[in-house]
């Protein structure tokens, strides 16, 4: 979720905010810097934003609490940030003013018919999957357990089920939204239809605070998880073959291929990894993956296929196969949580509509294996899209990327209190990779993984839909309360 900046004049504020007064108006809690809960309350998933110290962190229990927070912030000229899972790569889910942390609005309701699921805005992926799986259902979701479902869905929403079921935002049926005025509205195809259009792809932090989502689930009883590895000298063949294979393999296959360095300063050769999830039998999964292996021309050094019930399969992707759902949360957010925070991460991505030619692949792999530096995890990955997601016209929702067949990303992770030089090296490396793959892309980027380095983010995220989004911004937020670095308006 994203930061919101109050637009105000000096006359709109009557002095320092009386935070205790706001706390008295809330059903939920308000945490201030002097409170013992504050250190954990202000943390995001990434430690690189720890230097940002909010004046207060509110934990609303309902949409009325959210409205109180927005009215208070506007009246006192306080900047606002709305936090779901706290995974924004731009740090847009924190700020120097008031953070509205949605984590305690975390109820999941499955309609008795099994046709609809209602999710409060603070629900995280691991909890949503657990709850719907108990009813034999599945959700279009990602592979990070603690990502907030709201930011995920409203930014587009990619995952193993994308080719078969469509984007996460395509599953949205209705939403409850608190507007800048504090008014609570419901939107759908028949209610506030323009707002509903905008939320599906441009929703986080732009038009209001979403407090509840109703989505269509799907049914995926089992998944065949699989992981195969190759030696580095097969990189060009693997990446070339995968691009063509992912566009013709049945839609029941979710797949990604990556080159990875566990430590970019070790001198070791990168690892090549194919991972995926197949909706069907293990025999069919092996059959289709073997078609890729034959196209690569070399056998993998290792391969593992594991057919599991849907919820167990997702727990494996979450790196939580040996943990309970309660333990599969970030340390400091719940008493049983066991997942560590990450000190620093940077990622850049583009979306591609056709296979990258051989010389382009060579240049991209060369950029990936350049600028080595100790203590940095680095990955270059391609993730399959297309399929049903591309059956929706580009202007039917705010999510415009309906001609993309795969996403290409360069990401770096630093885990041991990195220096400024370490961070600069990671950024320079991702920039070099971006420069190598950008010419072969659609010139578009997936807004669900925000990229603060983009200079053309308006076109990259929204393309021909941007002008309509600006018009809707003026209608639903005429005074510009909701603002952040890459915010519309």
Image (cartoon, rainbow, N blue to C red):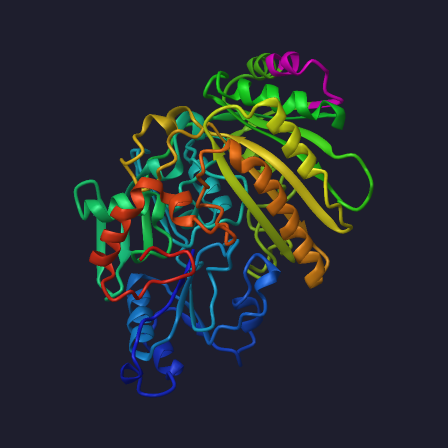
Mark yes or no: residue 16 visible: yes
- Seen from this angle, which residue lies furthest left? 190
- Is 445 rendered above or below residue 357? below
Quadrant where the image shows the C terminus? bottom left
Could one spot residue 231 in this view of the protein? no
Query: What range is drawn magenta here?
Result: 290-303
Which quadrant would residue 28 be assigned to in this image?
A: bottom left
226 up-or-down from 14: above or below: above
Q: How many marks?
A: 0
Q: Residue at x 73, y 33 (%)?
A: 271
User: Which one is in front, 295 or 80?
Assistant: 295
Q: In which quarter of the image is the N terminus?
A: bottom left
Q: Please state the horizontal and vertical placement of residue 134, each as a whole percent of the image.
A: 45, 37
Q: Position of residue 154 (x, y in %)?
A: 37, 46
Percent across and percent down for residue 38 are 54, 73
- Whether residue 335 sits left or right of residue 231 in the image: it is left
* Residue 305 location, quadrant: top right
Q: Does the magenta stretch include residue 313?
A: no
* Image position of 56 with respect to 81: above or below: below
Q: Seen in the image, is 237 located left or right of residue 217? A: right
For residue 297: magenta? yes
- Which residue occupies the foreground of this view, 68 or 230? 230
- Residue 166 in the image: state x and y as whole percent: 38, 30
Question: Which residue is situated farthest in the bottom direction here?
Answer: 15
Considering depth in this image, is 213 or 247 the residue closer to the camera?
247
């Amino acid at each position: 979720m994203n930061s919101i900046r109050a637009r105000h004049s000096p006359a709109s504020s009557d002095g320092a905010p009386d935070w205790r007064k706001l706390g008295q108006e809330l059903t939920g809690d308000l945490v201030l810097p002097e409170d013992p809960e504050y250190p954990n309350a202000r943390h995001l998933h990434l430690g690189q934003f720890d230097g940002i110290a909010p004046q207060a962190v509110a934990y609303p229990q309902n949409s009325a609490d959210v409205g109180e927070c927005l009215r208070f912030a506007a009246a006192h000229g306080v900047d606002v940030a709305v936090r779901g899972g706290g995974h924004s790569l731009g740090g847009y889910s924190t700020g120097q003013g008031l953070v509205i942390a949605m984590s305690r609005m975390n109820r999941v309701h499955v309609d008795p018919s099994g046709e609809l699921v209602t999710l409060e805005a603070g629900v995280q992926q691991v909890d949503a999957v657990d709850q719907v799986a108990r009813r034999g259902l599945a959700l279009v979701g990602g592979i990070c357990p603690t990502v907030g479902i709201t930011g995920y869905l409203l930014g587009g929403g990619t995952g193993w089920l994308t080719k078969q079921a469509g984007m996460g935002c395509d599953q949205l049926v209705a939403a409850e939204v608190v507007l800048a005025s504090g008014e609570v509205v419901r939107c759908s195809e028949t209610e506030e239809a323009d707002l509903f259009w905008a939320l599906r792809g441009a929703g986080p932090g732009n038009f209001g605070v979403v407090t509840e989502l109703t989505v269509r689930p799907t049914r995926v009883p089992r998944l065949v998880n699989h992981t195969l590895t190759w030696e580095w000298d097969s990189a060009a063949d693997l990446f070339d073959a995968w691009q063509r294979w992912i566009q013709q393999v049945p839609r029941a296959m979710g797949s990604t291929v990556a080159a990875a360095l566990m430590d970019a300063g070790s001198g070791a050769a990168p690892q090549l990894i194919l991972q995926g999830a197949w909706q069907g039998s293990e025999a069919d999964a092996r059959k289709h993956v073997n078609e890729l292996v034959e196209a690569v021309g070399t056998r993998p050094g290792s391969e593992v296929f594991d057919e599991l019930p849907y919820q167990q399969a997702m727990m494996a992707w979450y790196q939580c196969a040996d943990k309970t759902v309660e333990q599969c949360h970030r340390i400091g957010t719940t008493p049983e949580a066991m997942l560590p925070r990450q000190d620093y991460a940077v990622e850049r991505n583009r979306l591609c509509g056709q296979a990258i030619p051989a010389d382009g692949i060579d240049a991209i792999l060369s950029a990936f294996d350049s600028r080595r530096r100790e203590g940095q995890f680095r990955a270059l990955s391609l993730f399959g899209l297309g399929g049903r997601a591309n059956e929706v016209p580009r202007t039917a929702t705010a999510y415009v990327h309906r001609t993309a067949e795969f996403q290409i990303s360069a990401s770096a992770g630093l885990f041991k209190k990195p220096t400024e030089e370490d961070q600069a090296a990671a950024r320079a490396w991702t920039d070099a990779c971006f420069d190598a793959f950008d010419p072969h892309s659609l010139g578009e980027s997936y807004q669900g993984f925000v990229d603060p380095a983009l200079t053309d983010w308006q076109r990259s995220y929204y393309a021909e839909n941007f002008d309509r989004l600006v018009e809707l911004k003026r209608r639903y937020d005429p005074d510009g309360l909701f603002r952040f670095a890459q915010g519309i308006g």
